[in-house]
Amino acid sequence: MNEVPLFVPYGPEHLAAVLCLPESEPRGLVVLLQEFAVGRSHKNRMWTRAARSMAALGIASVRMDYLGTGDSTGEVPAVEFESVAIEEVVAVAELAADLVGTRELGVVGNCFGARAAVAFAAGTPACRTAALVVPGSLDAVLAPAPQTSRMGRAAKSVARRSSLVKRVVRPILKRGRGREPRPFVPEVAEAHGGTDLLFVVPDDGKHEGKLRAAAAGMPERGGRVEFELISASRITGTNFPVTAQPVLIDILTTWMDRTLPGASLRVGQLAQQP
Amino acid sequence: MGIDTERIASLRSYEDRGLAIRETLVQPRVGGASTVGVLSTPLEGTPAGGWVICHSFGIEQVYLQSLESTVARRLAAVGFAVLRSHAQGYGDSELGAEHATPGSQVRDAQDAAAALVEAVGVTRVGFAGMRFGGSIAALAADAFGAAGLVAVAPVVTGGGSIQAMARQAQMAELSSGRDAGESPLDEFRSTGVLDLLGFPISREAFEEVSALDLVKQLERFRGDSLLVQVSRAPTPENAMAGLAEHLRGLGGTCDVEVLADRAALRFGLPRYRRSEHGRKEDTQAGLSESIAAVVSAWCRDRQWQQAEVRS
């Protein structure tokens, strides 16, 4: 395994990235995308560790600092899901694929990075596989819930002030919400078909159901859609408990091994990389 | 098709004509293993000296990284060579978090200083850091015999700071709508590993942080120092005044700047905050700019008198 840091030109700015190369000819290249304002290694080096696990199976990867974060240049006063860093991701992925000499691409995204990942997959025919890690809010992959009516907002406001009203009103509001599952954002449907999709969610009984409901409402286009559950309390948007981190890394590495060409046929025990 | 090594080498650095600096990605050895860092240098002339940026401890390292990059560039723009790199256990380093303690960070900062001296030939080196990184910088400057120290909102005494981090971790979990369950400190007592928002703090690291006392531990630093207090009120705090007095007592100079800013309470916490569906805003841009301006102005005016670099 060999790691090479680079500055990727991006207009007048430069994006810092680290290319992780296997000893052998790479089977493909995986782009690792974390939450915005978290460095390219992710918290507690999760992407660094995932990159090294993948390299052990012949898979190259690139991890990057978004514009205005980490060692990248530029300033970003605000970010939105609707304008994710897709051009930045494309710039880094295209250059990295050229440098590595592969056209087989995969992408992993967490939180904000999950939206960027699925947008990248939707717009990149060479992207065969995507793993979307969404342990916190599902806003990265699900369309916004329909706006609550004025009456509904007033009821919520009253409910917030009174525990008695809350007990009565909240179940009614929840029942109303439960009828219409939130669909995926359009990028998921666009990626589906050309890209195999894996959703990694906590086993809290909520996330999986919502995502399965959204998947059921998506037109069948032939691509794989799978779910992996992580069992651990205290998982939030980008905060994976220390004990859950090796599990996540193993899930991501196994998925990329299965879905990129030339599967290694290895079994487990990958997350032990330093 | 093969790997394009020549082109990869050409992407190691870039030049910023506006700031008149060059940044080069480097892979120094610190703490006996490899890591990744960025060397920032002025485009013209010989560097006036060197600075090593010491990143913070635990999860704070993630939150302060962009500001550290800004400060490094601004110091290069006023004539210094600056190296910022990941200590072992952080970022792109070779070794895992189980190797990370405040002591290992102090060791790695000194190794980074030696790498900086070797890379650019500077003879005068200072250490700079923010929050816990400021404490690491102070300890490294003391051990290295450095010419300068910049500590922005340093943690002067460690007792209570781990507890504060644990409370912050619990608050973050609660604010995300999850039941925080057992306190991280309760878990630590039973498992021996303190899990602070996904960063593991070993018992050794916990004890080192708890025992931190800069006034007691700084014994021989005689260089020039700048302490920057970041607070909502403009009144100097006792801990900062005490540290400044101690630094002067050791034989060096010490300037104290107080930056009063409404965002002070969130300094060292996530810089971007969610404002509405799918939108996050930078809540510390003004404070970050103030810190970079104060630090670079002070460094630009430095005339180091008694700089020594250990051979």
Image (tube, grey):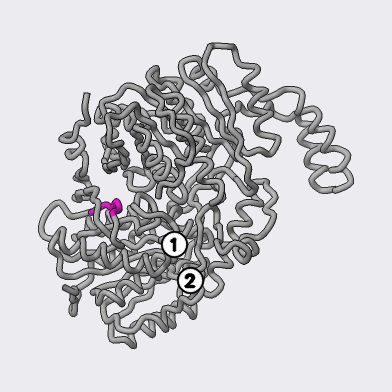
For residue B191, which quarter of the picture? Answer: bottom right
Q: Which quadrant holds the C terminus of chain B? A: bottom left
Q: Is B117 located above or below residue A52 in the figure?
A: below
In front of the other: A270 or B168: A270
Q: Could you tell me which residue is drawn at 37 percent across and 23 percent down?
A: A262
Residue range in magenta is B34-39
Residue beneath disc 1: B57
Magenta-drawn stretch, dominant element (helix, strand or loop): strand
Q: Mark 1 belongs to which subunit?
A: B
Q: Secondary structure at mark 1?
A: loop
Q: Is residue B166 left or right of residue B155?
A: right
Residue beneath disc 2: B209
* Rendering coords of residue B139 (x, y %): 35, 74
Q: Of the residues shown, which amino acid type is indicated by label 2?
A: Val
* Rendering coords of residue B126 (x, y %): 26, 69
Counting other residues with Cα less than 10 Å from the Cα at mark 1, is it few (<14), some (14-19), or many (20 or more)?
Answer: many
**First in residue order: circle 1 vs circle 2:** 1
